[in-house]
Amino acid sequence: MDFNFTEEQKMIANTAKEIAKNFPPEYWREKDLKEEFGEEFYKAIGKAGFTGMVIPEKYGGAGKGVTELLIAMEELAANGCGMAGIWYLVITEDFGGISIIRHGTEAQKEKYLPRIASGDIEFCMGLTEPDAGTNTLNTKTRAQKVADGWIINGNKTWISGADRARGMMLITRTTPKEKAPRKTFGISLFLIDLPNPAVNVTTIPKHGINYSHSCDIGINDLKVSEDALMPPLDGGWYSLLDTLNIERMSFTTAAIGIARLAMSKAIDYSKDRKVFGDMPIGSYQGLQFNLAEAYAGIEAAKLLNFKASTLYDNGASIAEVGNAVNPAKILAVESGIKAVYWAMQTFGGYGYAREYDVERWWREINLIRLAPVSQQMALNYVGEHILGMPRSY
């Protein structure tokens, strides 16, 4: 095992750090308050090739692995961008780029990948439903076959980036659950061009990450052609799991990056702040021990996450990757929440003030407890699929 970055990976990390310097916490504070998309940032990561990091060179990308993508994400987040350093890449490069690379037809690759790689279009994934959150097999959005294509009807919720996206990977049922020979059969994935008059998009007011909107979507008699289907018909469940593994790696990286950012700001503050006498508060073991423990957990989570991405890049099975990324996500979130909590404690009352940014990172990291899978469901995965214990849900 080699724990050192290659020279190319070091270059990617350094490029991400340089980009992040131009988009410091103050930039994201303003974008979050005004609920504005970070247009300048998106152009910058596009120009640097990050939106095409994993897209093959023949389609205009850099042809790198998921490991390189995670390196870029972490350094963007840790050096000032917080969750934004991951968010825009997740919803376009993960849901659009990687999914199409792995499961799209050649025609679909030629249509979408060059524009994703160049940063010209954004993507989203239509997965979650009001009655089918974690339990995707209860998806009710229905695609029905007609002579010259498909008619799709249904509702989706918490679809991030749908208000800006020009493409969506849409998860549907092509065979109703009650008619399927097994519960995982009958899920199919479609690539949908947006905007479309048959797709109604409304934004959801939310607690944080307001530099990107999350949306409710109503789909009413949406007509798509045969070539919108991502093969195989009725066999999209495993393609979806493949995408969700990447999403979990990315959110694990988010927890790591946000924790690093919050801790670095708190540590700098703790070296100067004095409350009782001449000793800086950074000398207090009540702060030191908790931040040190959080750091240890973050470092362990990072290694687990890179194990998952290396397995993925080397062609491991969905289960092998899942067995690495779910423990990584559990550990990153628990350690990350502790890191940001104690960063806020270090700042005291200032930690509650917008101008110090920690309160925003607290809002951001708490999303990762819930998405893309809750901590409890990740623990269920470990209990059942790794430890071999009875199914609990």
Image: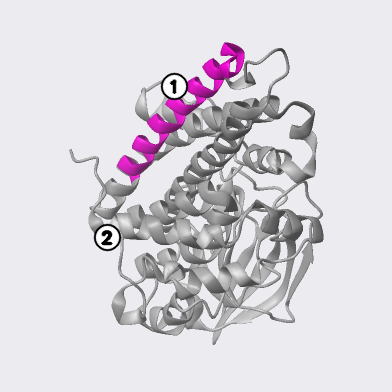
| 384 in relation to 63, above or below | above
> Which segment is the magenta one?
283-308
Query: What amino acid does circle 1 point to?
Result: Pro
Q: Which mark is residue 144?
A: none
Q: Closer to us: mark 1 or mark 2?
A: 2
Quarter the C terminus occupies: top right
| 72 in relation to 132, above or below | below
Residue 320 location, x and y as percent?
30, 41
Q: Secondary structure at mark 1?
A: loop
Residue at the left extreme? Answer: 1
Residue 290 location, x and y as percent?
55, 19
Q: What scheme was used to colour the molecule?
A: one colour
Q: Horizontal placement of 350 versus 271: left or right?
A: right
Query: What amino acid does circle 2 point to?
Result: Glu
Quarter of the view holding residue 109: bottom left
Marker count (numbered): 2
Q: Which mark is residue 390?
A: 1
Out of 3 and 213, give the one closest to the viewer.
Answer: 3
Q: Horizontal placement of 46 versus 387: left or right?
A: right
Q: Which mark is residue 8?
A: 2
Out of 332 and 150, give the one closest to the viewer.
Answer: 332
Is 284 in the magenta?
yes
Is 123 in the magenta?
no
| 388 in relation to 221, above or below | above
| 325 in relation to 5, above or below | above
Confirm whether residue 16 shows in the render.
yes
Quarter of the view holding residue 66: bottom left
Quarter the N terminus occupies: top left
Residue 338 location, x and y as percent?
59, 26
Q: Label the magenta part by its dominant secondary structure.
A: helix
CB contact under 8 Å: marks 1 and 2: no
Q: Earlier in the sequence, mark 1 or mark 2?
A: 2
